[in-house]
Image (cartoon, helix red, strand yellow):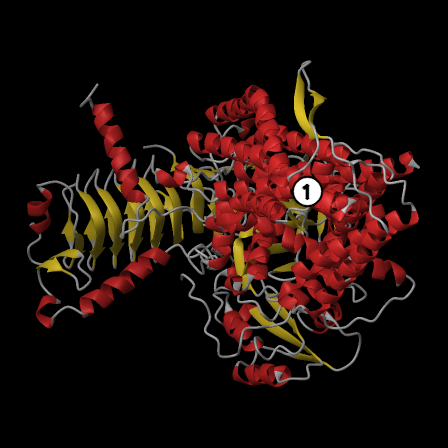
Amino acid sequence: MLPFLGLLALATAWFLLPLVPALRELARPTDIAPLKVVDRSSGYVAYFARNFRRYLEKQTAALPQEQQVGDFFGRLPDGTQLVRVHKAADALEREGAHGAENRLVVVDTPLTLKGGETFLMEVYARSPLTGGPDAVYRAVYAEQELVLGEGSTVLRWAHAGGRLSVGPRSVLRGRISSDAGVMLGGGTVFERIGAPVISVGEPSEPPPAPPAEPRALKLPPEAKRVGSHFRIDGDFDVPEGVRVTTSLVVAGRLRIGLGAIVLGSVKAHRAVQLAGEAQVRGAVVTRTRLVVGAGAWIGGPAIAEERVSLGRGAVVGGPDLPATVSAPEVELAGGATVYGQIIAPNGARTAGG
Amino acid sequence: MRLALLIPLYVVVAVMVTYTIRHYFFTLNRLFGRHRQPYVDIGTAAWPRVAVFVPCHDEQKVIGHMLDALLAADYPADRLAIVPIDDRSTDATGKIVDDYALRFPGRITPLHRTGGRPGKAAALKHGSEQAGADAGIHLVFDADYLPGRGLIKQLVAPFFDPEVGAVMGRVVPINVSRSLLTRLLDLERTGGYQVDQQARMNLRLIPQYGGTVGGVRREALLGVGGWRDDTLAEDTDITFRLVLAGWEVVYQNRSECYEEVPENWPSRIAQIKRWARGHNQSLARYWWPLLKRPPFVRRRTVVDGLLLLGVFAVGPLLLLGWALAMALYYLGIQISAGLLAILAVAMYSTLGNFAAFFEVAAGARLDGSRARLRLLPFLIVGFLVSIVSVSTATLAQLANFWRRGDHRWEKTERHRGPGEPLPGRSG
Amino acid sequence: MPGSPARVQLERARRLERIRIRGVKGGVIAPHRSMVGLPWTLWRLFTTLLLVAFGLGLLWAALPWLGQGWRLAFERARDFLGIDAPLGDQLLPLPGGITLSLPVLAVNTPLPDARTLWIAGIVSAALLLATFALPDRYTPFKYFLRLIAGLEAIAIGFFALWPGRFPYQLQDHVFILRTAGLVVMALVPVIVGFTLHVFDLALWKKALLTVALLAHLAVFIPLQVLAHLALVMRATAVVMPVLFLLFGLLPDVLIFVAFYGWALSWRGELERRELLPPVHLGARSAERRT
């Protein structure tokens, strides 16, 4: 009997051997926490900026009274090295002469930087801040106006309470936001910007209502009604100067002619092209590319699964009609304006520079 | 006799191989393929009016948390209507929702049902007929869910696409640590959402609307006849009705929400039986309309739709396969080791979606939860219970084919107490 | 050239990128899990195929030793268990014209008599009844025991109704089991290739996993077969169906899944080198799709 049991025991033990990690994980779990569900940051562009501001306020409030104003070189309560520039506006220059600035910088006074600095920690400006060319910022928060010089690089985020102007050939990684507006120079690359108005150069306004209602377009007989939209198989062209009163879903490519107006939203399974001065009052969605001609207007979100190209003076959204442009890649010509957000995870680029 | 047993066995094995190939393809697509989440970045828009329905029956433990979470949403308050549907609750649920309505007038408008057919589907039907007429989008949450502040906007965003009829987010188990069962269910959800649903979204197949953490476009819902109250799986039902009518169903992997999974086996068995019966109902109703391929529906959508409908039929089919293998064994007819291996490998799956072990593994690694993959061999434990439960439910359903059957509230047992702290969430 | 402007610029860009992806506490800030994928390179494809070939080649080369090792195991087990039976050879033809010699113990197959059938029946019934006394948290275990009891009841019924018609000898059972085990071993490099090597584990870890799994099965399969043999010799052929159906291939696959899960719990190269996982958004080469 014993040999028999011995054999069974050996076979069982050998069988259980690869199950040891599983049994250990069962008995003494090392990975048992629920996934962390991120709450807010995805849609709120200024999330990290606001968090930083709250953090700094809290830390600063915990400093001794005499250290809360004026020039300061020291540490915050949590150990972060801090330099506060108040009267000694050249303090940064002195430290920066040795290389990158690796302290958190607080600027209390209007300041114009020379350029070429590398800020490895955040920069916080209570007054208008003008950056110089070729500076690198890990992150910058300005309570008022912020100007980033030509060739600037932002690594994580930048926020301005006032207008944010970005010099040509700048590289803006992460989230860029402003409570007033963002004006971009040519040749600038960015990933995500949120502001009441975002423009390449001076912003363009949404077009006024046309003086007379264009003639309504009669849809082809093969268009099928699905709910409140019409679906068209294959490619479809909206002729120039007509009005489409419903939403459209096109299984092929969609072209909206010069000056045509679509009162609803449009979706195409292939590319969408808006000719100059065309308008879509609702959203424009495409599974591939969206090309928006000069002076064209989209009222609602513009969503493309490959690329959005906004032509000269093209506008998305309006002062009272916030909207988002979302595509892996976005191109903006001069005067292109978005009232709301531009998100381009693979990169957005402004023309020129 | 030999052929009478072998042929069905080959059919069963062919089905298993088909699902295995399908899930392998999904896994590869999710790992390496082009990722589609085109709407998730819409953070700024002129947000439309939304009605959020929360059907509930005896949910006093959790309904307060749910309503608090909805009230804290960053969706414009004047465009968000919260409609808890209290369906003949015998506990304090009705009183709790009325209290909230008093404290937040205009924001929370409860509906109380005292008659009509019971059950979630009927409650939604009633709710959508009585409320939300001015809301273009109807979202649905079960009472035990905990939506984050940004979730409503994320779930509404796809509806800017005029073709979208329904949206589904990702459910994340919150009570993972309670038991082996909850840990296995966490793996099941991971495979099902992180890989399966997202791959179907990437490939433009049919991501399924799952009945919670999601919603429908009201005009699409009305266009296909509204919620059906004679179904046990109103989610599968509406998914296929929308697809057949030319609407798109989208999945958003980023739109996560906590849920409670069953913590004990009786609850799990009840849940899986409910899902099986409902899903099989949809299979019976929609396999033929799908096969006829209405306009707008592509061939590959038909194929995947049929496979999706058949997910809960796979369990009994696998049992049949083993029974055939056993019969052949007793008859002395040798079955190839390869066939047996296929049947054996199929036992290491999760039954909710028949996700194979490698699909679960891919999902967990993408989640950054690699250590819990050591539990993979225990999948057979959950599968064994599921396959028996699903098979008995299917047999009972077939036996009761001529009886419509009584509908009643069937829901997962709640374990979270009213005073229990919520987990920390970033943001 | 060291120090050249381009090189300096590249170094600077890399340094800045390291800063960009790190949080203030030094941890890497990765994209959200809902967005990430894995990088796919030709190198990965090449190494996957190489590892599959490696595994198959290793198994092929080890076959003679496998046969000898299993023969040794059978000899030892025969002596250990006191089985009075000669050790013979069963030839298994393999693809490529090769024949593998597998050991076989020429034992008689003990068939159950009426007493054995009654005992088996009582034990099965007791097992079934016992499952009703177990609490709910043992539900899977209950189902498993009921499955054993049910399958055993069918076997008992078969032997009771058709006593002389059971189609398998013990040698057949052993042979089928061993052959099935070899098939599983042959499938291991291929299935591991398709399902594990696609991940970003280090090459040596992938190779180690293949070798460990094959080695484990090489030891387990004869142990499994010998255990079955010993059990049948004690309990008669009435347990053979249960052993075959529940304890044949299923444990082999369980071993595979256990190794697989353990391997995929190991740290990947992306994580080890603190690189960001890719997000596969919007094909850049999609101009053709306008």
Side of A9 where A117 appears, left or right:
left
Q: Is residue B421 above or below residue B209?
A: below
Q: Residue at x 24, y 29 (%)?
A: C9
Residue B311 point in image, percent of width and height = 73, 49
**Is residue A307 among what the camera can see?**
yes
Decide: is A14 above or below B237.
above
Helix, strand or loop at label 1? It is helix
The residue nearer to you, when weighing A309 against C255, is C255
Task: Out of B159 and A351, give the one closest to the viewer.
Answer: B159
Residue C225 vs B113, above or below: the answer is above
- At 74% from the left edge and 68% from the top edge, which residue is drawn? B125
Residue, x 45% and y 73% (percent of image)?
A: B421
- Count all numbered tags in the image, as a single digit: 1
Please tell me which residue is depicted at 68% across the width and 45% down the height of the picture.
C247
Q: Identify which residue, B234 or C175, lies in the foreground.
A: C175
Where in the figure is residue C29, as x and y percent of width and height?
Answer: 36, 48
Q: Evaluate whether residue B217 shows in this view.
A: no
Residue C10, given in percent of the width and then of the height, sits at 26, 29
In the picture shown, does residue B228 fall above or below B305?
A: below
**Which of the image's four quarters has the N terminus of chain B?**
top right
Residue C175: name its quadrant.
Answer: top right
Kindly identify the amino acid type of the residue bearing the numbered disc 1: Ala
Question: Residue C267 placed where, x, y %?
Answer: 41, 42
Quadrant housing the C terminus of chain B: bottom left
Q: Which residue is label 1 attached to?
A: C230
Q: Dot 1, how many residues are within 10 Å of its Cα: few (below 14), some (14-19), or many (20+)?
A: many
Residue nearest the observer in this picture, B168 or C271: C271
